[in-house]
Image (cartoon, rainbow, N blue to C red):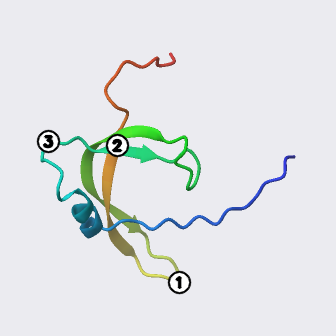
């Protein structure tokens, strides 16, 4: 079995306000690309994706013997591969 290093990864997650501020000067028709890290915190070999949708996703956790039922909304931006031709396995 190979040795494994442990890496505590805690990125600063952007808020809607920070995103608005970052893109405030972009034209309305500017496409938004998203670079997805190849490993935690590693953007050297990132994969390019494009922003395609936004949905408020409702998360629900049932009640347990130690905690009541809990509901939260997670605001999610969805990304897809950029337009192009790709080889897809059968």
Q: Toward the viewer: 51 or 24? A: 24
Mark in the foreground, 2 or 1: 2
Mark 3 vs 2, N-terminal side:
3
Q: How many marks?
A: 3
41 in relation to 85, above or below = below
User: What residue is shown at x 37% (from left), y 33% (from top)?
Assistant: 81
Element type at mark 3: loop
Q: From mark 1 to mark 3, how far is it between C-alphas?
A: 49 Å
Judge by depth and name the residue closer to the eye, 68 or 26: 26
Q: CA distance from mark 2 to mark 1?
A: 37 Å
Q: Which residue has dot 3 on it?
A: 29
Task: Count neighbours of disc 1 (C-alpha within 10 A) and say few if under 14, some if 14 to 19, many if 20 or more.
Answer: few
Query: In the figure, residue 68 lies in which quadrant?
Result: bottom left
Proximity of marks 1 and 3: CB atoms separated by less than 8 Å: no
Q: Earlier in the sequence, mark 2 or mark 1?
A: 1
- Which one is closest to the eye, mark 3 or mark 2? 3
Residue extending furthest bottom? 66
> Residue 1 shows which numbered tag?
none
Q: Is residue 15 left or right of residue 6?
A: left
Residue at disc 1, secondary structure? loop
**In the image as oriented, which residue stretches furthest toward the left?**
28
| Residue on which the image places disc 1 | 66
Q: Where is residue 27 shown, x and y percent of the image? A: 13, 47
> Residue at image x 23%, y 41%?
31
Please report the residue visible at 72 percent of the width from the left and 61 percent of the height from the top.
6
Going from N to C along the chain, the mark reached first, 1 or 3, is 3
The correct choice, above or below, for 88 with respect to 27 in the image is: above
Q: Position of residue 26 (x, y in %)?
A: 18, 51
Q: Can you give x and y, in whole percent of width and height, for residue 46 in the image? A: 50, 42
Q: Quadrant of residue 50?
A: top left
Q: Which residue is mark 2?
A: 79
Q: Residue at x 14, y 42 (%)?
A: 29
């Amino acid at each position: 079995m190979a040795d494994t290093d442990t890496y505590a990864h805690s990125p600063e997650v952007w808020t809607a306000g920070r995103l608005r501020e970052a893109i405030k000067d972009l034209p309305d028709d500017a496409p938004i690309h998203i670079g997805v890290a190849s490993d935690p915190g590693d953007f050297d070999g990132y994969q390019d994706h494009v922003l395609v949708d936004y949905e408020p996703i409702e998360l629900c956790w049932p009640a347990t013997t130690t905690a009541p039922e809990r509901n939260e909304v997670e605001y999610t931006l969805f990304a897809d591969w950029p337009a192009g031709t790709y080889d897809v396995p059968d």
